[in-house]
Amino acid sequence: MVAAGGCPFREYGMGDSLEQGVQMQLSMALNHGIVFDFVPVTFSDFNSHIVSLGVGVACALLAKLRARESGRVKMDGVMFACKGTLAAALAARAFVEEADGDSRLALMGLGTDLTQGFEDMDEETAKACRARLNIVAMNSLQDTNVGHGDATVTSLQARAARAGGTAVFVDVEARLQEFGKFGNPEHGWYPAAFRRKCCSAVKATILDELGTLVGASPCDVTATGSASEDGREAALPAPPVPTPPVSAAEKLSRRVDYDGPARSRQGPLMLNGLLKQAGQLNHVETKVTLLKDFVGNEMFVAE
């Protein structure tokens, strides 16, 4: 997730309450089969400069994508919103240029018109993106920041399709009762979905769309739990056969001392033999090395 715009990065782990973040992640994993990871920098870390944010976060995303391609990490897609559009676009376009085989990337954008980084593509780049990207841009029909009306819907659908995706719209006016007593939240519709309990159904709509995009599915806790329990029981080793107790004298008599390659039983008084061996050791004088001599050694002189 790009931690910018209205993405719920604070609710899912980058906020003041780590416990709340863990609970939100666990609930989402169980109900939708999704877990969020973050590029842990925000708009303010770049002095609120949107181009710096876009380039910096895009570099981090591209590094993660390269690690995914080499099989070192798991990453199904990138979620972004509004100010994070440029970062997602730059990383996705760089990924498309480097990708091999049938590798693809899912992009989920909230409250975005897909202009930054997507609109300026030439036809060759757009064709390459359609072959590698699965994009969903999710907006409110009544969000005046993105635009509203049939013309906006048509243009956004065309822009998304050109880059390899589709535009999905939520009729917020028809679901105002789910947003409480605040009226139409305009561009704040998707942040409200993750922050207000009354908007849980809207949040579920967003996460269902994201789950479909990345191929996730809810966890069957009952089935998974029973299967894992059965597996653990089957994997348990047989209990050890109890052995009769052994006296302390017998344990001492079983000790073995090593004298070179040959083994010989020494009985319970091994300490005498060890002391005898210690008396035959040669005394070693301590050598003092000054720090200046150590640093001046030719092994540490740069060529």
Image (spheres, helix red, strand yellow):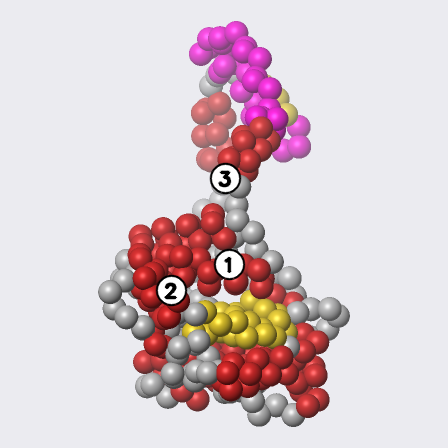
Query: Comparing marks 2 and 1, which lies closer to the viewer?
Result: 2
Going by the image, does 126 lie left or right of 43?
A: right
Q: Quadrant of residue 42?
A: bottom left
The magenta stretch is: 233-262
In the image, 32 versus 152, the foreground residue is 152
Residue at the spot 52% in from the left edge and 71% down from the top edge: 168
The tag earlier along the polypeptide, 2 or 1, is: 2
Q: Is residue 188 above or below residue 28?
A: below
Are the two marked residues, 3 and 2, in contact with CB atoms closer than 8 angstroms? no
In the image, 52 versus 153, the foreground residue is 153
Give coordinates of residue 232: x percent, y percent: 56, 30
Q: Secondary structure at mark 1?
A: helix
Q: Secondary structure at mark 2?
A: helix
Give coordinates of residue 221: x percent, y percent: 50, 39
Q: Is residue 110 visible?
A: no
Q: Is residue 283 above or below residue 82?
A: above
In the current view of this chain or complex, which residue is farthest to the left?
A: 181
In the current view of this chain or complex, which residue is farthest to the right?
A: 101
